[in-house]
Image (tube, rainbow, N blue to C red):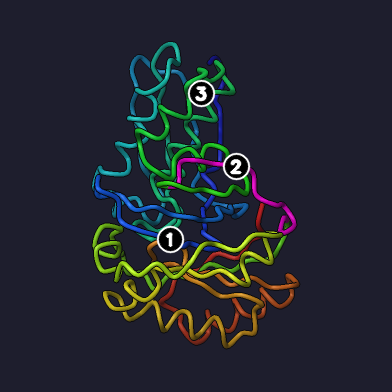
Amino acid sequence: MTAPITETAYAKINLALHVRRRRADGYHELETVFAFVDAGDTLTATPARKDTLTLTGEFAPALAGEEGNLVLDGLAALPHGAGWHVALAKHLPVAAGLGGGSADVGAVFRMVGAAHGLPDDWHARAAKLGADVPACVLSQPMIGIGTGTELTPAPTDLAGCPVLLVNPRVGLSTGPVFAAWDQVDRGPMPKGTARAITLAGRNDLEMPAIAICPQVAQVLAALRATAPWCARMSGSGATCFALYDSAKARDAAAAHIAATQPGWWQLAGALR
């Protein structure tokens, strides 16, 4: 790399997330549709003597080194020549169901790919850093099964769909939410277009998340009151999303929620 490289770590949402069973290794068998919003954190890499990281942005203090270290772990996982300095502007909330550090690592993989190309086993290297990382490297609609690392392309009929993300500014760790799942298999994820899967699908982690973080139910109620065609929690929460048929409807919803819940974080965008 001779010139700076800038990449967006796109916010990840789960249009549907069906938890089928807990595996003997402690992980869970999942069926999900990954989608990505056209905004997120920003990473800029410049040449350096060794790999280093600086953090800025609203949510940088919340990282406390953990997710920031994932960026350095991503660099360490790939051949990238001399050292890189990565400046990470953290715009997305942490422990929020949006991919978090996985999205940042995905951006690192894409930057390394642009500068040097990715090794043939990049998928396995990404999966070692987190179950969401392979999907976040691609940052395109994907169907994930297994732990979420077995990927196939998803229908792209929702590209450009207006989306509103809302988080009550409460962090929600993934582990306790999965642990609170009642282990009831409610059936497979439906097939069809991305819109059809979203409408007929569900997020099996919503109820356990609400039991831990009641604010999730408040966010969902507020979003559903704005008449989206779907409102659902993403991942293990606490961020929820709403999908609209027009940007005008999304923007009106964003304005209403900003006025009634000024303390909540939100991001208005479109699906990639």
Kindly identify which numbered label has been placed on residue 152: 2
Nearer-N-terminus badge (1/3): 3
Which residue, given by chain and number where applicable, does mark 3 sit on? Answer: 112
Residue type at the position of mark 2: Thr
Could you give the CA–CA distance between mark 1 and mark 3, rounded to whole angstroms?
27 Å
Which is more N-terminal, label 2 or label 3? Answer: 3
The answer to which quarter of the image holds residue 241 is bottom right
Front residue of 49 and 100: 100
Q: Secondary structure at mark 1?
A: loop
Distance between mark 3 and mark 2 Cα atoms:
23 Å
Classify 124 as above or below 238. Answer: above
Q: Is residue 238 visible?
A: no
Q: Please identify the dominant SS of the magenta region.
A: loop
Q: Which mark is residue 235?
A: 1
Q: Nearer the viewer, residue 48 or 247?
A: 247
Can residue 103 be spotted in the picture? Answer: yes
Residue 60: % across, % down: 34, 50
